[in-house]
Image (tube, helix red, strand yellow):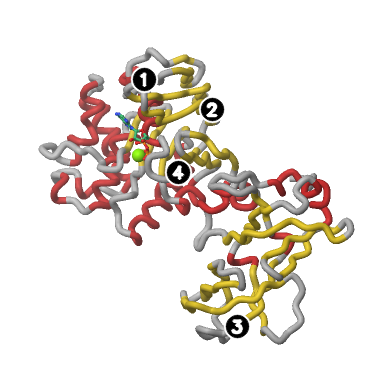
């Protein structure tokens, strides 16, 4: 059983740069945990502390049941795959994969057996005699993974391992990593700034911003029930739209006013919104929860808007719009709807799919505590 437990981990560099604050995370045995956040949010620092390459300023790290705060990296039974792969240029692929085993004094036969097995698993048997400079980016990436798994470590750490690959290859390699994890079931912690990688790979996702965990949850929960405006805006492509406006009650029915347009909110929000009546708030709604209608139609729960850009993507069309209050936003339509630049439309907002946030970069999602069962 190898769970990884991080208890109240903080890291302050040079007594002044706080890279990570009060980080708490339990990664279950065999789980694939993704830590995601923009550049500078402290992701690499976390991984380096787990690997033992960096000492935490405070807090405890457990691997399995062992407190490893003072255990040196080589005794932590962890393998790390870096963004730049860090292969030895003067060694061929076989030697690169074998190196860690050699250092640990494995027998020649055992090394041979393991390197063969791993190279078959990763489809790189034909590359064993090549030097890294004679490999493509994707092949180097596989060698780096091979070098990590050949030791059968208790935990894998990945630091943006796909960032140096071009888009097509990145998608394919992502799927391979997922299949590999399915086969090996080794506890993995994977760091990325890419929300798509986080969504597709993670059993759970831990979202970081400025050294602080914003939310840890399953991909679907993160997408459908983001805890704050930062998490809401970080996931989805295109990302969630935000409209500044005001909460207003018509009798006991909660509404949200965006300029002169009124959206009637679900009654289940009555209680949570009671404290926010007449307050300036922000409504969040994803592009797929908007639908475009003729301006002349009578449509409830709609805002008026003008089309700025029409972007066909083959399977759908993204429509860039500006509403009456000057807010820019994006809606998706199917490819058969005829919409042109400068069209004036009504955009229907699905009230069931809205979130109401407090203002500010990480403004709280107050509609999460609406009493609905999860
Ligand atoms: N060795 C270091 N000395 C001083 N500051 C550092 C050091 N390593 C990282 N930092 C700072 O800590 C913060 C988090 O960095 P990092 O963990 O690399 O973020 P990420 O991997 O999410 O991009 C950044 O502000 C970075 O400048
Ligand atoms: Mg990093």
From this view, report whether residue 280 is shown above or below residue 168: above
Left or right, 252 with respect to 303, comes to: right
- N-term mark: 4 or 1: 4
Q: Which residue is found at the position 54% from the left and 42% from the top?
A: 203
**Which residue is under mark 2?**
24
| For the residues bearing labels 4 and 1, Cβ distance under 8 angstroms | no
Which numbered marker is on residue 37? 4
Q: Nearer the viewer, mark 3 or mark 1?
A: 3
Residue 75 x, y percent position in the rendering: 34, 17
Whether tag 2 and tag 1 are in contact, CB under 8 A, the answer is no
The label number, if any, that marks residue 55 in the structure image: 1
The residue carrying mark 3 is 344
Mark before the other along the chain sequence, 4 or 2:
2
**Percent coordinates x, y for residue 142 in the rendering:** 29, 46
> Is disc 4 placed on a helix, strand or loop?
loop
* Mark 4 within 8 Å of ligand 1, using the beta carbon: yes
**Ligand 1 found in image quarter:** top left
Tell me where residue 338 appears, x and y as whole percent. 56, 86
**Marks 2 and 1, the one that precedes in the sequence:** 2
């Amino acid at each position: 059983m190898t769970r990884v437990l991080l208890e109240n981990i903080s890291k302050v560099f040079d007594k002044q740069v706080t890279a990570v604050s009060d980080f708490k995370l339990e990664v279950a045995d065999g789980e694939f945990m993704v830590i995601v956040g923009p550049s500078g949010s402290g992701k690499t620092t976390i991984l380096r502390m787990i690997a033992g390459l960096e000492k935490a300023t405070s807090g405890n790290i457990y691997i399995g049941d062992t407190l490893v705060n003072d255990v040196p990296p080589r005794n932590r039974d962890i393998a790390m795959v870096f963004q730049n792969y860090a292969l030895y240029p003067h060694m061929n692929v076989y030697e690169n994969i074998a190196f860690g085993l050699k250092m640990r004094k494995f027998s020649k036969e055992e090394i041979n057996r393991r390197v063969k097995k791993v190279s078959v698993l990763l489809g790189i048997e034909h590359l064993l005699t090549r030097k890294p400079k004679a490999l493509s980016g994707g092949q180097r990436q596989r060698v780096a993974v091979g070098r990590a798994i050949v030791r059968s470590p208790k935990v894998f750490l990945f630091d943006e391992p796909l960032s140096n690959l071009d888009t097509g290859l990145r998608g394919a390699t992502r799927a391979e990593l997922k299949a590999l994890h399915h086969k090996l079931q080794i506890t993995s912690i994977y760091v990325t700034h890419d929300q798509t990688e986080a969504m597709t790979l993670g059993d759970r996702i831990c979202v970081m911003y400025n050294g602080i965990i914003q939310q840890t949850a399953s991909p679907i929960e993160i997408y459908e029930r983001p805890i704050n405006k930062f998490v809401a805006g970080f996931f989805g492509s295109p990302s969630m739209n935000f409209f500044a406006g005001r909460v207003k009650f018509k009798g006991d029915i909660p509404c949200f006013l965006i300029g002169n347009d009124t959206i009637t909110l679900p009654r289940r929000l009555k209680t949570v919104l009671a404290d926010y009546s007449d307050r300036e708030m922000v409504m969040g709604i994803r592009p797929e929860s908007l639908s475009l209608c003729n301006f002349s139609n009578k449509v409830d729960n709609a805002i008026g808007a003008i089309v700025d850009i029409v972007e066909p993507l083959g399977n759908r069309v993204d429509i860039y719009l500006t509403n009456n209050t000057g807010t820019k936003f994006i809606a998706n339509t199917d490819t058969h709807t005829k919409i042109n630049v400068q069209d004036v439309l009504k955009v229907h907002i699905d009230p069931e799919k809205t979130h109401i946030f407090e203002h500010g970069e990480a403004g709280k999602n107050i509609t999460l505590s609406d009493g609905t069962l999860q």
